[in-house]
Image (cartoon, rainbow, N blue to C red):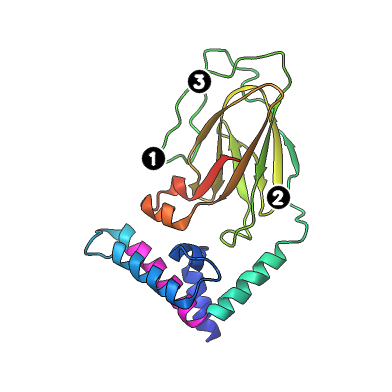
Amino acid sequence: MGSTFDGLTGALRGHDAYELLGVREDAPDEVIRHAYLALVKKWHSDRNRGAQAEEKTVLLNVAWEILRDHRAEYDERRRRVEQDSDGPDPWDEAEVVVDDPWSEVPPTATPPSPRNTYETPPPHFPPPQRTAGPDARLVFRRPRKYRDSMRAYILKIDGVRCGKIRPGNEVSVEVRPGVHTVQAQIDWYSSPLLEFIAQPGETVRFRVQPANVVSWLSESLNRAFYLQLEID
């Protein structure tokens, strides 16, 4: 049974079975079954053609088989992962100060397109206007989630890597006031590019986490929608 269970959890490819089926951890078995049947019907090959629908169906089948036949073992593994991530992480970057990439460029320059934006290329805009006010502070918070619980997310500001963040932690970054873009990334997957205005002396708070699986599936597994990054 152990090897079968390990094979099934590996087939999830880092996804959470409960999130895939859109149910709570304490959902009754009958609720899970109805959720599975509804999603499989939605993504059935008779309604959706192509490899993407097939991949979604495979993930749903794996999640259902795990929660149907190995739920207790799966819940115990999830609890162990959460407990293991409670300790201090020597790789965490609690405080990061980023050099302004626009400090030495002419006012008419435009920023390079951030990498890994895929189908959502960013708009080009001039560097933020210099002000006499203090720098703005960006605070990124990442709540604990089972998916990617052992992985760090890379944080990018204006297409430049500025640090990384692990589950349950916060990262603080100082930037010049003005218009900026932020994005989170893991491997070849990312969040959509988020544009915002930082005022002098302002603290802007963001929350980054795995995107809701149902929403990600609705975006046809678009790599730029794998993570969710929004103003908190």
**Residue under the point 48% across and 50% down:** 226
Please name the amino acid that badge 1 sits on: Glu
Which residue is the site of mark 2?
Answer: 169
Please name the amino acid that badge 2 sits on: Asn
Considering the numbered disc 2 on the image, is that residue within a helix, a strand or a loop?
Answer: loop
Which residue is the site of mark 1?
Answer: 119
The percent position of residue 104, horizontal first and vertical second, equals 64, 17
Residue count near mark 3 (Cα–Cα under 10 Å), binned few <14, some 14–19, many ≥20: some
Image check: 168 left or right of 182? right
Please tell me in which quadrant of the rendered image residue 204 appears. Answer: top right
Which range is magenta? 54-70
Residue 98 in view in this figure: no
Answer above or below: position of 2 versus 135: below
Answer above or below: position of 48 versus 191: below
Which of 217/103 is in front?
A: 217
**Residue under the point 43% across and 76% down:** 30
Which of 191/114 is in front?
A: 191
Mark nearest the camera among 1 and 2 is 2
Considering the numbered disc 1 on the image, is that residue within a helix, a strand or a loop?
Answer: loop
Q: What mark, if any, has residue 110 been given in the picture?
A: 3
Instruction: Pick whichever of labels 1 and 2 is earlier in the sequence.
Output: 1
In magenta stretch: residue 55: yes
Residue count near mark 1 (Cα–Cα under 10 Å), binned few <14, some 14–19, many ≥20: few
* Residue furthest out toward the left: 46
